[in-house]
Image: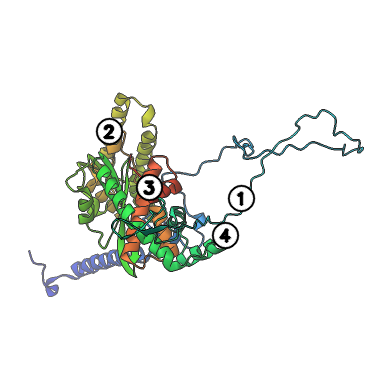
Amino acid sequence: MKPPFRYRLSEAEKDALLIEQSVLIERLTARISELEAAINKPQPKKTSSNSHTPPSQDGPGRQDRKRSPIRPKRPRPSRPGVSRPLSAAPDKTERCIAGACPHCETDVSGAVQRRRHRYDHIDLPVIRPVVTRVELFGGRCGGCKRRYRAEAPAGMAPGTPFGPGIHSLLLYLHHSHHVSFERLSRMAAELFGLTISEGAISNGFRRAQAGLDTARAAIKAKLRGARVIASDETTTRIDGVTHWQWVFLSDRAVLHEIAPRRARSVAEAVLGDHRPEVWVSDRYAGQQALGQSHQVCLAHVLRDVQYAIDCGDNVFAPGIRDHLRWAIRVGKRRHELKDSTLAAYAGKAERKLDALVAVAVAHPDGRKLQKQIKAWRTKFFVFLADREVPPTNNVSEREIRPSVIFRKVTNGFRSSWGAQIHAGYRSVTGTARLQGQPHWDAIRALVDGKFAVA
């Protein structure tokens, strides 16, 4: 029914209409003020504790930022004082016999003396390269009249004058400790008395590429047999152009790949026809549906939860935070739980999450978080059903962290072959670490042609 025309209203009706309109205007004005205040309200700053921002970008005062949502601050227990243990097999022992009493200067050199104190003195000898002059003798054969020459000793073929020990040391210092070519050349001259140019260092690295490629192929074959694979990726630069460094990790192998794309096709090329039972990663789209089941990194989820709390959601996000922390604590003591107990915990985790996502949420950031939780609902607690699956992807982040530091120190690679050598180096040393082998031993074995994937 249409409202009556104004000239048909009585004076009392006109007054009532004016009052109603003034009330409506006041309500709309108050709502506009409320929305303007919400728009102008400053959002909390994204830091490493509530987002995927790295700690290096937290800015000034980052030492005062909140603790990680996974590891709340705890008082550090006191520890008993200890001293450096004595070496089990000293290279040399100096036995010092007192000649005179330090108090009255009486001669005690002929008296029976007992050991009163002992300690280790440790020092480095002067390190200088060992130069072996190789002389190959020969002559002219009396039978075929052709010239001949003796064979070179093993490992001392003509060509580069630098042996495997020097090549291993240069690789180790550059890729594990991020020493530049110029500083490598200077260190070799000042510490070891070895003259080696930056070009010779580069040539030595290129000679190692064939061995690194062979080792990486063996590592990839080992990775394709794993039932649980964790993966992560980060940016790198080649000649100023952004590329992506991927890491794929199992309990027996670590593989690094540097590719011009962040696409899912990189992981598919590494896996081939293999599809692991569980894939562990963050929620990046290129990391999805690569395994039969998927465990998302709960550390990443907790940072998003913390951001919703910082924005003001005090209903939904705190409950999710406490529940995920509880699940991670259960995961840390899986080794001491029976299968039936762990299954009960898994059922409890699922029921509690169902109850939490059913809560009505009014805060907009809380609703956004609730929508994300519902979208990833089935990928939170795979680790409670499989003891080999970690609840977070921290193992991949720790593995790729040295390459991030390498990128920040060196500003990337100047050539594609240099990037591939770094990927091969990180693959070899990462796999060796899983086998309990130090980086130096693994690289020396690789240069000597003795590296093997267990």
How far, Cα to Cα, is label 4 from label 2? Answer: 54 Å
In the rendered structure, are the residues bearing label 4 and label 2 in contact, judged by CB atoms less than 8 Å apart?
no
Residue labelled with disc 3: 430
Estimate how packed mark 2 is, as few (under 14), some (14 to 19) or many (20 or more) residues with alpha carbons within 10 Å: some
Estimate how packed mark 4 is, as few (under 14), some (14 to 19) or many (20 or more) residues with alpha carbons within 10 Å: few
Q: Is residue 201 left or right of residue 300?
A: right
Name which residue type carries label 3.
Answer: Gly
Residue at 42% across, 68% down = 199
In the rendered structure, are the residues bearing label 2 and label 3 in contact, judged by CB atoms less than 8 Å apart?
no
Residue 405 picture quarter: bottom left
**The C terminus, quarter of image:** top left
In the rendered structure, are the residues bearing label 1 and label 2 in contact, judged by CB atoms less than 8 Å apart?
no
Residue 318 in the image, given as x and y percentages of width and height = 37, 45
Q: Nearer the viewer, residue 294 or 126?
A: 126
Residue 298 in the image, given as x and y percentages of width and height = 33, 45
Residue at 28% across, 39% down = 353
Q: Could you tell me if residue 357 is visible in this image?
A: no
* Label 2 SS: loop
Work out which residue is located at the far bottom of the displayed protein and give it: 7
Q: How is the image coloured?
A: rainbow
Residue labelled with disc 4: 191
Name which residue type carries label 1.
Answer: Leu
The numbered mark, 3 or 1, whose residue comes first in the sequence reads: 1
The label nearer to you, 4 versus 3, is 4
Residue labelled with disc 2: 385
Residue labelled with disc 1: 124
